Image: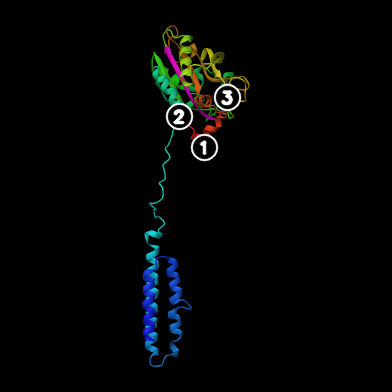
């Protein structure tokens, strides 16, 4: 009987040493110390031994059972703690995961393109606050208080005298207050209006420009804006200057280009007209110069403003402005 329990011990330790998985170790635990395990059965059969052998055989069997249980725990810890079963195990045979390179948002791309065109034309670039006073956003630009012209721009009012700027034109006043002519500058940035549809969003990007010097005429305005349109699109693009009204310019003109969606046939984007407005422009109103103490007998100038999203829609043939802000990677990755 002593040789039998010793044989059980040797078999158990040998099999545990060769076990390579948790399942194998659990199976060996059942085989040796389970309810019907070899050591358990040995202990149950001790009563069949002669009386003088029972104490030593029982003691030996219990020691072996304790030893096997300890080795089972050690084997489980060894397997569970090994690299082969670790949660942070890296299989070096798997193919690598390529990093997706970041790209500029299409609005940022168009913004940079417009800025680069004007830099080549000798313009500076200026930035200013997005939260403005009523004076800079309206009054200094010839929008008197309670004047109907303010209805042209649906406004987010922070308080009676503070607004989210409706255009980047307030920078024109800020720049002219600090600098004497000649001035040649563009002002890109975010602006805010209470408007949302296929071609408008409450927040959008705008680029405005200002040129002030002696002997500046409407022909200079047409030359700069025609160059801009041709460089953004191509020299074959059709454009027109259409008389319009802006409180801070006189005379004023809208610049339209042929609708790139319908090619002039009429669609929902161009409101069935075949043309799309891309920017507003005009000669700076004398009242604006008077607000910054410029001598209107010596200096003249022109100003213009365009929505960057509108330019992007036309350049890429997109029929819904809101797609730029939906964060759909399938859409953005095309650019």
| Residue 131 in the image, given as x and y percentages of width and height | 48, 28
**Residue 129 on the magenta span:** no
Real-space CA distance between mark 2 and mark 1, rounded to the nearest whole angstrom: 18 Å
324 is higher (above) or lower (below) than 80 = above
State how many labels appear: 3
Mark 2 sits on what residue? 108
Q: Estimate how packed mark 1 is, as few (under 14), some (14 to 19) or many (20 or more) residues with alpha carbons within 10 Å.
A: few
Contact? badges 2 and 1 (CB < 8 Å): no
**Residue 202 on the magenta span:** yes
Q: Judge depth for marks 2 and 1 and give the one in front.
A: 1
Mark 3 sits on what residue? 261
Residue at disc 3, secondary structure: loop
Of the numbered discs 3 and 2, the one sitting upstream in the chain is: 2
Real-space CA distance between mark 3 and mark 2, rounded to the nearest whole angstrom: 22 Å
| Residue 130 in the image, given as x and y percentages of width and height | 47, 28
In-front residue for pair 66/33: 33
What residue appears at the point 38 percent right and 90 percent down from the top-left corner?
53
In-front residue for pair 262/313: 262
Q: Which residues are magenta?
A: 200-212
Of the numbered discs 3 and 1, the one sitting upstream in the chain is: 3
In-front residue for pair 12/324: 12
| Residue 66 in the image, given as x and y percentages of width and height | 39, 77
Mark 1 sits on what residue? 330
Q: Quadrant of the N terminus?
A: bottom left
Contact? badges 3 and 1 (CB < 8 Å): no
The quarter of the picture where residue 47 lies is: bottom left
Real-space CA distance between mark 3 and mark 1, rounded to the nearest whole angstrom: 21 Å
What residue appears at the point 37 percent right and 69 percent down from the top-left corner?
18
């Amino acid at each position: 009987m002593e040789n039998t329990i010793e044989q059980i011990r040797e078999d158990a330790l040998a099999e545990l040493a060769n076990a390579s998985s948790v399942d194998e170790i659990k199976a060996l635990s059942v085989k040796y110390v389970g309810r019907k395990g070899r050591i358990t059965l040995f202990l149950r059969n001790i009563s069949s031994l002669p009386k003088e052998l029972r104490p030593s055989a029982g003691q030996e069997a219990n020691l072996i059972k304790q030893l096997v249980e300890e080795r089972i725990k050690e084997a489980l810890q060894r397997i569970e703690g090994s690299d082969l079963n670790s949660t942070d195990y890296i299989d070096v045979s798997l193919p690598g995961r390529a990093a997706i390179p970041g790209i500029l948002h299409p609005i940022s791309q168009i913004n940079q393109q417009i800025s680069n065109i004007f830099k080549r034309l000798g313009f500076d670039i200026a930035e200013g606050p997005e939260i403005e006073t009523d004076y800079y956003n309206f009054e200094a630009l010839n929008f008197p208080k309670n004047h109907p012209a303010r209805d042209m721009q649906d406004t987010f009012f922070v308080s009676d005298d503070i607004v989210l700027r409706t255009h980047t034109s307030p920078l024109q006043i800020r720049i002219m207050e600090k600098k004497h002519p000649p001035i040649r500058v563009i002002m890109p940035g975010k602006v805010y209006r209470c408007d949302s549809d296929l071609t408008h969003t409450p927040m959008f990007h705008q680029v405005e420009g200002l040129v002030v010097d002696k002997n500046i005429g409407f022909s200079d305005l047409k030359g700069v804006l025609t160059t801009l349109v041709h460089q953004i699109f191509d020299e074959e693009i059709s454009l027109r200057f259409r008389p319009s009204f802006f409180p801070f310019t006189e005379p004023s003109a809208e610049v339209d280009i042929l609708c790139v969606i319908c090619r002039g046939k009429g669609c929902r984007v161009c409101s069935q007209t075949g043309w799309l407005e891309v920017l507003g422009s005009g000669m700076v109103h004398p009242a604006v110069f008077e607000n910054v103490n410029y001598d209107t007998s010596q200096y003249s100038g022109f100003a213009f403003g365009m929505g960057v999203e509108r330019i992007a829609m036309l350049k890429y043939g997109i029929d819904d402005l809101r797609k730029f802000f939906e964060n759909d990677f399938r859409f953005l990755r095309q650019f």
